[in-house]
Image (spheres, rainbow, N blue to C red):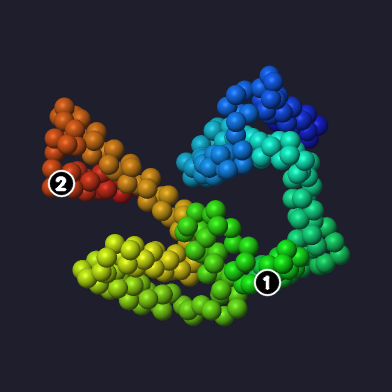
Amino acid sequence: MADSKNAGAEITRLIDIMAELRDPKTGCPWDIEQDFASISPYTIEEAHEVADAIDRKAWDELPGELGDLLLQVVFHAQMAQEQGMFDFADCAAAISDKLIFRHPHVFGDESRDKSAEQQVKDWEAIKAVERAGKAERGTLDGVALGLPALTRAVKLQNRAARVGFDWPDAANVLDKIAEETAELVEARDHLGPDELEEEFGDLLFVMANLARHLKIDPEQALRRANTKFTRRFQAIEAALASDNRRPEDSDLAEMDRLWDQAKLAEKATG
């Protein structure tokens, strides 16, 4: 494993490589053409690929995925430096300053002898000071628009809960889910596509709230459900392939039976 000196040298090497790729005369045409908006989707994608490697416990892949994510930071910083806005050092300094400011019990004179609950309260108070410095006065100000929708829903709800706008327990949320489901059915049967989409969004928003009350990360839960669906559907395909058939050569009843078999096989193997 590289020591801190080697890590610093590799960061410098990466920054230099990125600058060379963006050189208007000798760089890569694709890299030169990019801007913040065109690179932003790749930044989000790379963050998800890091999460995917962690979910799969693919530890041998994780360094590469983290490197891909680091490249996104370096790419954005290089473009900003070219425009005289900031550079990679400013990014590193900003997060270092933030970490020190948010951990006075580690880097300052505050006591570390506090409960996790008190630490969360202190953390929120510190972030409130930071938001005030950015002229973010509203309770929901500063919740990034670019977050995945489920994650942003939870963050918005957490902010509202801090000022008392929240159901007291999960039972109330379940009642709201039943109400929103009925409204979705009503929209399906009697309203137009815009109203149907709105009611569906309302139901998803309440489902995110239920996840929050149950202390479940909805993004992670849905990722795992996606993985489970993929695994079981691939089992269906494998079973059909053993008979030289594909899913389109089957029907729903047979595929549903094969799905149940895959589900039972998973339970049997723990």
- Which x, y percent locates residue 212? 49, 67
Residue 235, quarter of the rendered image = top left
For disc 1, the marked residue is 137
Point 63% across, 72% down: residue:
138
Point 27% across, 65% down: residue:
192
Of residues 230 and 136, the one nearer the viewer is: 136
Of residues 46 and 193, the one nearer the viewer is: 193
- Which x, y percent locates residue 223? 42, 49
Point 60% across, 78% down: residue:
163
Q: Amino acid at mark 2?
A: Leu
- Is residue 128 shown left or right of residue 223? right
- Which x, y percent locates residue 259? 23, 46
Q: Determine whether 150 is above or below 183 in the image.
A: above
For disc 2, the marked residue is 252
Mark 1: secondary structure: loop
- Which x, y percent locates residue 90? 78, 45
Visible residue check, residue 208? yes
Visible residue check, residue 10? no
Crowd around label 2: few <14 · some 14–19 · many ≥20 (10 Å): few
Q: Earlier in the sequence, mark 2 or mark 1?
A: 1
Q: Determine whether 230 is above or below 31 in the image.
A: below
Mark 2: secondary structure: helix
Point 37% across, 76% down: residue:
176
Residue pushed farthest top?
26
Residue 89, quarter of the rendered image = top right
